[in-house]
Image (cartoon, rainbow, N blue to C red):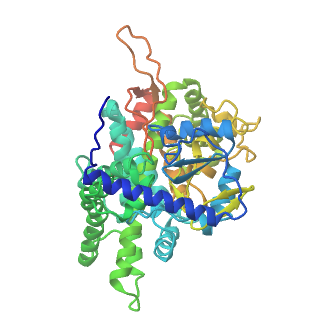
Amino acid sequence: MPSFELTALPASAVIPLTGTCLYLGWQYLRRRLANPHGLPLPPGPSRRIPWVGNASDMPTGHPWLKYDEWTKEYGDVVYLESFGQGIVILGSLEACVDIFDRRSSNFSDRMGWGWILSTMNYGERWRKRRRAFHQFFNVNQVHQYRPIQLREARALLPRLLESPERFAHHLRHTLSAVIMDVTYGIKIADTNDKYITKAEEAISRFAHAGNPTTYLVNTFPWLKHVPAWFPGAQFKRDAIKWRPLSHEMVTWPFEDTKDLMRQGTAKPCILTALLDRITDEEDRAEAELIVRDVTGVAYADRVGKTISATQTFFLAMVMYPEVQKKAQEELDAITRGTRLPDFDDLGSLPYVSALCKEVMRWQPVVPLAVVHTSVEDDEYRGYHLPKGTLFFGNAWSILHDPKEYPDPEVFKPERFLKDDGTLNPAVRDPGVAAFGFGRRICPGRWMSDQTLFSVVATVLAVYSIAPPLDMDGKAIKLFPDMTPGMLSYPRPFECIISPRSTQSLKLIQEVEGETY
């Protein structure tokens, strides 16, 4: 007969196993008490393994695409469970509005993340920062930043002429220059700027960590309470390494601008305005901490998202030359090829405006909105929504809904226009999903719209953007290949950027001769 031996589990395995069993048992008991009427959970993948749930079904890489498939199969409210953690995917604007807007008091909570406004737990600390941010980035205030946006968009032109192959780098520089000037009054260096280098590294870490599949804590929230050495607590070990990076990103420009204020040489900006508003009655240290966080968020949030959008614009122009041609014809009709466009032309450029909308819709920067967590048990459409469930608004599904946007995979600005060529207000604006939902909707969305327009109109006025060529001189066909993560960017691609004409070259050279 075969013999069997019992082998004791090592302590490193017993501790997490015991913790998981206790957590799952507690979850089961709590749910029975919280749902006395026995309401069903929303539909979802039925292959649910005992104790494990749908863990094996959880997508990696680009989860919004798999969630979109489930939305088409099960409906716009999909429920999953992974090791006892409930997850709800909302795949329609109606469901997102119902949950995140109309029931925001229950679904506005998030797993807090330091000074980042979009991931901070809802409460007084969040409200103070949000209120200060909104003062400078609401729809009535962002017009004052247009001269800076236009100046930096034009400064981009000679850089593209000198080294067009580095267009992605030039875009990052341009957008960083805008927000650093607006927020801190700081003019960044042309190369190797210390603020930009630090911020790009911090933002990339944030985007990586924000992916819901990156860390086990997104599946096992109780891991938030374990020490860093505990198995499965990689997020804490990474946080220890990355915390100085995040701190330096928000502290360096803040302290440098404060030094300039003491010297009387600081340029008027959001930071100086906020610091000047601090009264003697306030706790100075606490007030300055709020100012530091608000200005840090302004930089991190605007640069990361707008860089992705402008890179997507270049990719779309390579893939859809007919769209580029139509936009340039509209620009030429306004400028006659003798000047560069400005914000006064905005009302006369409906096709360019529609193109910018399509950039935000076609490949959304944040395809899966940042996770919300429910504070209490709730009921929706006859379904039970347990307390502590994670809720994701799938912006990708909303912005690729074929009922709202026929042929959603195609880049087609015409979808936002009437037959007479004017903007059609009846077509759903991508901003309803591209900037988040509920109380957490991005407060800097109007600033983003202006920046994107300034870059798109300025570049298309004088440059042609064409696909790269192979060894035989034939155009290489490109496809949208986006990175995973909380912020989604086009993966690096090549294109040919060249002046449209001798007159265009003259306009670029005139810009190059100006002092910025």
Residue depicted at 28% across the width and 40% down the height:
5
Q: Please tell me in which quadrant of the rendered image residue 281 appears.
A: bottom left
The image shows residue 509 at horizontal and vertical percentages of 36, 37
Is 496 left, or right, of 196 in this rendering?
right
Q: Please tell me in which quadrant of the rendered image residue 107 appears.
A: bottom right
Number of numbered discs? 0
Please identify the quadrant where the N terminus is shown: top left
Is 510 left, or right, of 197 in this rendering?
right
Between 173 and 251, which is closer to the camera in this rendering? 251
Is 187 left, or right, of 24 in this rendering?
left
Q: Residue furthest bottom?
A: 281
Residue depicted at 38% across the width and 68% down the height:
293
The image shows residue 75 at horizontal and vertical percentages of 69, 42
Residue depicted at 51% across the width and 25% down the height:
319
Between 216 and 463, which is closer to the camera in this rendering? 216
Q: Is residue 454 visible?
A: yes
